[in-house]
Image: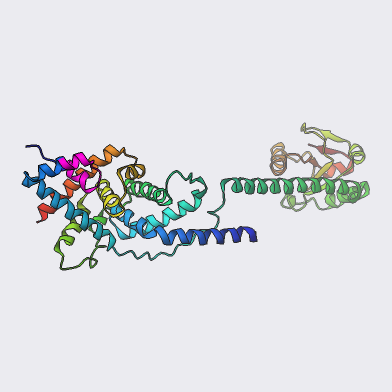
Amino acid sequence: MNKIILQHKKQNIQLSGVYELYSADLFRYSYSILKNREEAEDAVQEVFVKYAENESSFKGDCSYKTWLLVIARNYCFNRIKNKNFNNAAINDDGFDGIFNPDYDMNISLKDALLNLTEEYNELIYLREYEGFSYMEIGAITKLSPENVKIKLFRARQELRKILKGKA
Amino acid sequence: MKHYDLEISRFIDNELSANEQKELFSHLSNCEDCGKILSDFMEMKQNSRSFYENLSVVLNKTFDLPFGTTQKKGEKLYKLLFYFSAAASIILGAMFLYKSTSVVRLETKYSALELKYLRTDIAKNNSHQNDFNNKSKIIDITSKEKSELSVQKNYGTSQKKNKLKIITSIKSEKNLPPADVKNGYSKLSQRSQEIQIVQVTKNDFLTPQVVGN
């Protein structure tokens, strides 16, 4: 029994390390899809519980981060499909007070991103923030690199259109 | 004039080849619209990045792995098998103990003499039907005792078990409505299907006779 507790503690420490390393980015990514702070926090928790349960099934054919992002993505889209998902999340004000108030573009960008579809929003996040290549984005989103290229272009067009409309 | 907006998107992602870049730059020098698109895309890229960089990440919930989630599937299976075998051992042990006790009781606890006393005792107190349940007793008898009692197989039950249920509160066989007898038996058989039931009436002690089931 003590051995099990020790093993549990050891894995908890390891997981805490992984959590420290990736939780912020997982939160951002979850937020880009769910657009709600509370929901994104829940997503991060769920991802790490799933990670703990399925750690042994990690094959090493991608980076840990990519694997965690895939888990997060599956959770987020399942959550959106769930009838209980709070659609009012769109109005969540998680971005407020974060940007430089002198920079008006940021406020507009916040609104524009919140109005963008989950799929486009996640592509923008994965490309602009994470800096992933089309291939890497395809590995996470299960799209071909060609498809990623087209969808990312459409996401930018859509974002630009919203920003222009706001202006 | 063909616009190069897709190429612009690829360009800001560094996904254009050298030749494609050359072609794009030559186009940009002549197309104001595409120049504007490039400018907007670049600005959006920069702002989107800073947008997520500056997103405050305050994870209020502390992360603590629920105990048991680290177990591998194989370990869970072994654990289940262990519990299953432990339960099976307990059940088998209980069955063995129960059987041993029955044998001891059969041989030592009830003699034919005690059985006779019990019958007499019951016969003395058989005046009230309400005492039916109180005076119901289960006793064990040996095969020899069973043959001495000349149990009648009126109700067709098997007599493999050397157990005897004595029921009182019946004044005479003649006054006993058949339905009551049946009810009495059915009640008892609900409690235990395997117990042999022997009904002892007042007449049994006048002319020793036991009705068996």
Does residue B58 show up magenta in the picture? no
Q: How many marks?
A: 0
Q: Please identify the quarter of the rendering in which residue A90 is found.
A: bottom left
**x, y percentage for residue B153?**
81, 32
Q: Quadrant of the N terminus of chain A?
A: bottom right
| A3 relative to B41, above or below | below
- The magenta segment is B6-22
> Which of the colour schemes (rainbow, by chain, secondary structure, one colour) is used?
rainbow
| B118 relative to A147, above or below | below
Q: Is residue B170 left or right of residue B64?
A: right
**x, y percentage for residue A84?**
33, 51
Classified by dominant secondary structure, the portion drawn in magenta counts as helix
Q: Please identify the quarter of the rendering in which residue B179 is found.
A: top right
Foreground residue among B181 and B51: B51
Q: Is residue B37 visible?
A: yes
**x, y percentage for residue B114?**
90, 50
Foreground residue among B113 and B59: B59
Does residue B15 show up magenta in the picture? yes
| A99 relative to B212, above or below | below
Residue appearing at x 50%, y 50% in the figure: A55
Foreground residue among B213 and B29: B29
Residue appearing at x 90%, y 48% in the figure: B116
Q: Quadrant of the C terminus of chain A?
A: bottom left
Q: Is residue A69 left or right of residue B114?
A: left
